[in-house]
Image (cartoon, rainbow, N blue to C red):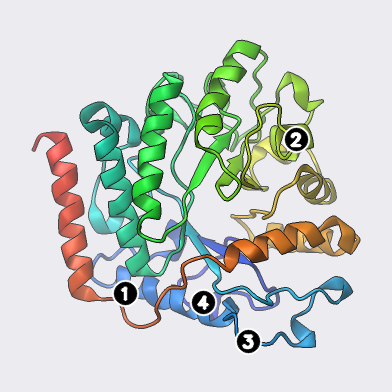
Amino acid sequence: MGFTGRSPEEVRTDLRPGGVILFGRNLEPDPASGPAACKALNDGLQARWGVPVSRNVSDRERGPGGLAIDGGERALAIALDQEGGAVSRLRPWVGDTPNLRIIWEEGGASACEAWGRLWGEGLALLGFNVDFAPVADLWDGHAGTGMGDRCASRNPAEVAAAAGAFLHGLEATGVRGCLKHFPGLGGTLLDSHKGLPELTDQARIGENARPFIALSHEDRLVMVAHLKLPATEGLPASLHRGSVIDNPWGVRGRFLPDDLEMGGCTDWDWDARVRLSLAAGHEWLLVCQTEAGVSACAAALERLPSSAWEQALERSRAMRAHLREPRPGALDGAAWSAWVSRVRAAAAALAGV
């Protein structure tokens, strides 16, 4: 879930999420104090909702049907969208950084891996263990879709090479990455934050899926787009089982829908969004923007029988057991300053400064 506030005390306590996602609204923009405040926030969230493997689960921490909500998990998933370029939550602290297309065109796979590792090192210092990056969509040059140069190339093999290298660097630091936005938004004309984009060209749809086919595996986080296709029977791909767990390309992974508050899925009420997401095979439900949305999602979940969510819960618990458990304590100021200097130097090198 997303939330408002910049301190643990400002975050609602009536729910027990399996993960949280931070946005710019949760980060103090001051580069002198913001990073330390972020680390303190993440430590507080981890202390509240992260459950060590050795801890027993009380009856109060059991969900409907008595199923343990946190038994066996090691860490709370704490996520950020940190791609670099246009989507850089850390920009106030590190300045402008290159997008994936520039990194790929100027430096190839080695530069993509280096930037993935850089972001992972910084996120680990701040207490994050999940990064919703990289983008594996195909570049198409269309304006107004929210994608643009977040995409490495129009060539599927090059996108797979760029995104795969970024993931390799990122996950070498212990921060889990995520492929997005399956099955691919290349060629769309509408931003899925605002409405439901559609693709009908089967050849284009097949091209879009190729990077995901190349990079997916059973333990890979894969975010599914709100995207209407001929095979989705009027639904967004994110809510359609035949486009998620039973997708025709054999793409495997730990699936989650893009933010369920986005315009691409709001034609469906919360009961439908939650029910269809779980039926599609998602392990997480991502609700990013408002407390009202988080509450509506939780209420819809409570109205379902336990058989609708038990399998998703068990799989998400298994994933959390292998998430990096951030070390509590004050931000290492010297390590952070050195890291920021490296990021700025790498950005300047790509810009030719």
As shown in the figure, which amino acid type bears the numbered disc 3? Arg
Q: Nearer the viewer, residue 26 or 138?
A: 138
Please say if 81 is above or below 317.
above
Real-space Cα separation, disc 4 to disc 3, in angstroms: 14 Å
Q: Position of residue 22 (x, y in %)?
A: 48, 61
Q: Quadrant of residue 197?
A: top right
Name the residue nearer the viewer: 264 or 342.
Answer: 342
Between 29 and 178, the one lying in front of the other is 178
Q: Which mark is residue 246?
A: 2
Amino acid carrying label 1: it is: Ala
Residue drawn 71% across the image and 85% down it: 57
Q: Which mark is residue 46?
A: 4
Q: Earlier in the sequence, mark 4 or mark 3?
A: 4
Q: Toward which corner of the image does residue 100 lie, by quadrant?
A: top left
Q: Nearer the viewer, mark 4 or mark 3?
A: 3
- In the picture, the disc for residue 36 is 1
The answer to the question of whether label 4 and label 3 lie on touching residues, with beta carbons closer than 8 A, is no
Marks 2 and 1: which is nearer the front? Answer: 2
Question: CA–CA distance between discs 2 and 3?
Answer: 36 Å
